[in-house]
Image (cartoon, rainbow, N blue to C red):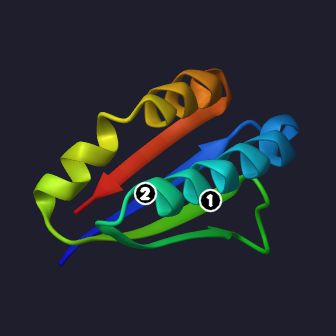
């Protein structure tokens, strides 16, 4: 098992758009990657521009496959201008 957590702080005016796009990213990942077991998206109740992702992959190689998917690249390109900070922990 390989666990990845990601925190995002996005521009407040982009929070709704980011939420919609990150939920699509989660759905795409779970639909297309059998080696992704969990992809949860959480939003802070106090700060709607703060997001927490919890992802579980079979192993680190599966996460590498995930990062090389075209929908991953599209997600990253789309949300990049909205993101104020991002932190990834494995």
- The reply, left or right, for residue 86 in relation to residue 57 is right
Q: Position of residue 29 (x, y in %)?
A: 48, 55
Q: Secondary structure at mark 2?
A: strand
Give the image quarter of residue 63: bottom left
Return the residue nearer the eye: 70 or 73.
70
- The quarter in which the C terminus is drawn is bottom left
Q: Position of residue 80 (x, y in %)?
A: 57, 25
Q: Are marks 2 and 1 in contact (CB under 8 Å)?
A: yes
Q: Position of residue 4 (x, y in %)?
A: 31, 64
**Does 31 sit above or below residue 70?**
below
Return the residue nearer the eye: 5 or 57.
57
Which residue: 44% across, 29% down? 70
> How far apart in space, not on screen, are marks 2 and 1 (Cα)?
8 Å
- The reply, left or right, for residue 90 in relation to residue 29 is left
Total marks drawn?
2
- The reply, left or right, for residue 80 in relation to residue 70 is right
Q: Position of residue 61 (x, y in %)?
A: 12, 54
Which residue: 30% across, 34% down? 68
Q: Dot 1: few (<14), some (14–19), or many (≥20) neighbours within 10 Å?
A: many
Q: Secondary structure at mark 1?
A: strand
Q: Which residue is mark 1?
A: 51
Name the disc covering residue 77, or none. Answer: none
Give the image quarter of residue 32: bottom left
Q: Which residue is mark 2?
A: 6
Q: Dot 2: few (<14), some (14–19), or many (≥20) neighbours within 10 Å?
A: some
**Does 54 sit above or below residue 60?**
below
- The quarter in which the N terminus is drawn is bottom left
**Does 31 sit above or below residue 82?**
below
Return the residue nearer the eye: 13 or 41.
41
Label whose residue precedes the other's in the sequence (2 or 1): 2
């Amino acid at each position: 098992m390989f666990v990845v957590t990601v925190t995002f702080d996005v521009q407040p005016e982009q929070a709704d758009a980011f939420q919609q796009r990150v939920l699509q990213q989660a759905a795409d990942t779970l639909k297309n990657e059998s080696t992704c077991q969990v992809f949860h998206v959480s939003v802070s109740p106090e700060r709607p521009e703060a997001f927490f992702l919890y992802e579980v992959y079979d192993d680190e190689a599966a996460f590498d496959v995930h990062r090389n998917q075209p929908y991953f690249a599209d997600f990253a390109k789309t949300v990049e201008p909205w993101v104020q900070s991002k932190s990834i922990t494995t």
